[in-house]
Amino acid sequence: MIMNELLSIAGRFAIDGRVVSVAPLGNGLINDTLKVVTDSGRAYVLQRINTNVFPDVELLQGNIAAVTSHMRAKLEAAGESDLDRKVLRFIEVSGTGKTWLEHEGKFWRMSLFIPDSYTYETVDPKYSRLAGEAFGHFEAMLADLPCPLGETIPDFHNMDLRARQLADAVAADKAGRLKEAAVQELLSGIDEFAFEMGKAERLHREGKLPKRVCHCDTKVNNMLFDADGNVLCVIDLDTVMPSYVFSDFGDFLRTAANTAAEDEPDLSKISFRMDIFKAFTEGYLSSTASFLTDIERENLPYAATLFPYMQAVRFLTDYINGDTYYKIQYPGHNLVRARAQWQLFLSARAAVPAMTEFII
């Protein structure tokens, strides 16, 4: 896209001043992100929304508006100052009352850029505890959100759905890979623990496990910090939607508590880090005491096993289907990923007694 077109798109939002520059920002994998600077000295974040991932832009932005306005009101009532650094503020398109713009079939949005803020990729006990506290606080602030949110990615963390997708892949065997020994070994293990890993959906059907407003993409780099290392706010709100608290708890640990990369081929390098679990759990429990139920709390170790299990199922499903969903870097990449996640699941499951003892 040429610069004049970007300048025109940015200028249609209700911003302060005239746009003087537009430049790429960050390394996000989903949306195209740009930094916009105006002659007033204000800066903004311009994003092209990936409608392949988020096809319902009105629902997406409606969710974000509901969440940010609720948090802003709570922070203001608590006497917090400098709210634009502690909760994201999205900018309306001039004269429309909407926070998104359609231009030649593509959708754009803009938020206020938060200056002197930083993200970190570091996953260590210090930042894991801060992450647990921040994401727990995020859930706590939204526990009484009056308006229901929609699912920006329906059934995103529904284990029953992922199991059905695997069963369908096995039945079709589109790529003829079902006969491979590694595939059969994984399928056998997945089947062995299928009932155990379906616990969340069963508890919900029985009315024992509520859905809450969750972030659903809990990573250390989805928080902004100030220069002193204090958490300013949680960012990347596209996946904020109803889910079980297990989503925010388990998905963070799936990546952060892994001693190796998600696609590590050497399974001996993969294990579950209890130091990260303890740090994240301490932070999370400190900020969720106001709403977390006994069932939610007691099943946090289960959540730590559910997400590597679910991801192993998803990678294996894609491998059997012929690598149609996840991008691969070499033949067999999805099988390597599935085996790595399975090893992490086994390690996390072996640590459940220690996790349970720590929580209780």
Image (cartoon, helix red, strand yellow):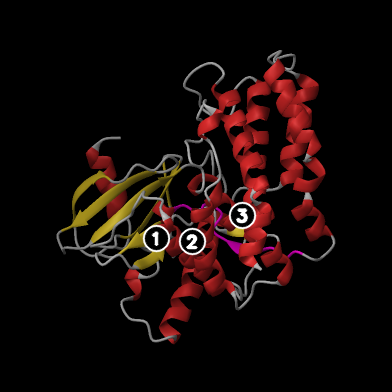
Vertical side of 250 occupied by 104: above or below: above
Label 2 residue SS:
helix
C-alpha gap between disc 3 and disc 1: 21 Å
Snapshot quadrant of residue 206: bottom right
Judge the density around disc 1: few (<14), some (14-19), many (≥20) Cα neighbours within 10 Å.
Answer: few
Res 2 visible: yes
- What secondary structure prevails in the magenta region? loop
Relative image position of residue 122 (x, y in whole percent):
36, 50
C-alpha gap between disc 2 and disc 3: 17 Å
Relative image position of residue 148 (x, y in whole percent):
65, 67
Q: Is residue 338 left or right of residue 185?
A: left
- Kind of residue indicated by mark 3: Ser
Q: Which mark is residue 279?
A: 2
Q: Which of label 3 and label 1 is nearer to you?
A: 1
- Kind of residue indicated by mark 2: Ala
Q: Which residue is mark 3?
A: 247
Of callouts 2 and 3, which one flags the residue occurring earlier in the amino acid sequence? 3
Relative image position of residue 21 (x, y in whole percent):
18, 49
Label 3 residue SS:
helix
Q: Nearer the viewer, residue 18 or 32?
A: 32
- For this orientation, the residue located farthest to the right is 206
| CB-based contact (under 8 Å), mark 2 and mark 1 | yes
Report the residue at 62% width, 39% height from top. 311
Q: Nearer the viewer, residue 61 or 68?
A: 68
- Decide whether residue 218 is among the magenta residues: yes
- The stretch of residues the image draws in magenta is 209-219
